[in-house]
Amino acid sequence: MLINFPGDGFLGIYSADNADAMRGESFHKVIVDEAARVKEEVYYDVLDATVADTGGEITCISTPKGRNWFWREHAKGLDEMGHQASWSFPTSANPLPQIQLAAEMARERLPDRTFRQEWLAEFIEDTGGLFRNVDEAATAPLASHPSEHKGHGGVTLGADWGKMTDFTVIGGVCRGCKAQVVFDRSNKVDYALQRQRLAAIADRWKPDIIWAESNAMGEPIIEELRRSGLPVRGFATTAVSKAPLLEALALAIEKGELRIMPHPIQVAELKAIEVSTSPTGHVKYAAPEGLHDDTVIALALAWHGAKGSGGFLMEAI
């Protein structure tokens, strides 16, 4: 169904069930209603291509439906450094009194899972996810001062390095009150500046230990930091060492032992970690394709330091 305008512009209404009707089209704006119900291949193989020639944009509107492609795109949009943006509002945000009343009635008569997804617009955790109770744990202040944690037993830092595609993230946990106190995330920053940033955070919080990823570029960075007098220890990310590191963090969050900062991208990355089993029977934890786990690794390293060494991390030589 088309509405044509003078000047060759038009407004078209299409069905995602017949995606081939949109192939070859060139749009300036695409609005996808109930996007989570649209097949993944329709979005990536057809719709994406329709705005390529014009540099147009796509707006997806939907009630969540588990953790499919719509959830992944929503998570990407929470990153302020990305090229897209995401919003979420519950039905009760509608100012119409009758809608607010309907939301109240739905809370009383619907199962919790259904109400949270259909009326609160929440992406419900799948059974295959590693981290549970993430929202309940996200109660730590977004900003705090070292003086507020004086006498708590010290602070530990965790650092996960990146430069272009990945992000460099520095996390910190107070050993006494078991709360996250540091969240620093950057991208496309040279290694010299990354070292300076970590040194500045360490000067502010005076950590007694800093666990930093030693893979690839991490080892020379760690060496420079050690030369400057910082208490840095290296962690080599392997299939053997990563699993218990993340499991310890997951257990702390699920049991309510650790309070984390409610940074949207950190919450999204924690919820995104998937559990899979290799053909040889080994358990693997990883973020879905297109997403990152940098904030998760940094927080896990900081929590490991706060809890004390469990003997499973590999120190860089």
Image (cartoon, rainbow, N blue to C red):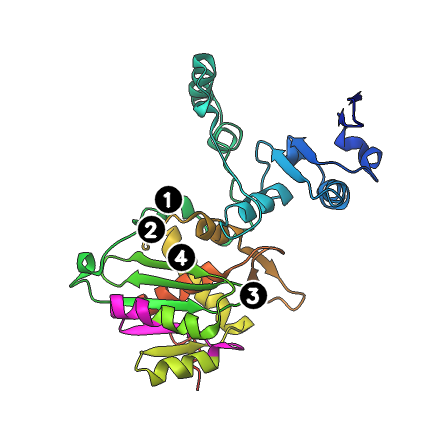
Q: Secondary structure at mark 3?
A: loop
Q: Secondary structure at mark 1?
A: helix
Q: Which residue position is annotated with label 4?
A: 251
Q: Which residue position is annotated with label 2?
A: 256
Q: Are marks 3 and 1 in contact (CB under 8 Å)?
A: no
Q: Does the image show residue 279?
A: yes
Residue that appears at 66% across and 32% down: 31
The location of residue 277, given as percent across then percent down, is 61, 61
> Given the current orientation, which residue lies at the most extreme front position?
7
Residue that appears at 46% across and 59% down: 296
Residue 35 lies within the magenta run = no
Q: Looking at the rendering, in which quadrant would you find the N terminus?
A: top right
Q: Nearer the viewer, mark 4 or mark 3?
A: 3
3D distance between C-alphas at marks 2 and 4: 8 Å
* Amino acid type of the residue tagged 4 in the rendering: Leu
Q: Nearer the viewer, mark 2 or mark 1?
A: 1
- Dot label at residue 136: 1
3D distance between C-alphas at marks 1 and 4: 13 Å
3D distance between C-alphas at marks 3 and 2: 34 Å
- Dot label at residue 71: none
Quarter-wise, where is residue 286 in the image?
Answer: bottom right
27 is higher (above) or lower (below) than 216: above
Q: Which residue position is annotated with label 3?
A: 164
Q: Are marks 2 and 1 in contact (CB under 8 Å)?
A: yes
The answer to whether residue 34 is left or right of residue 293 is right
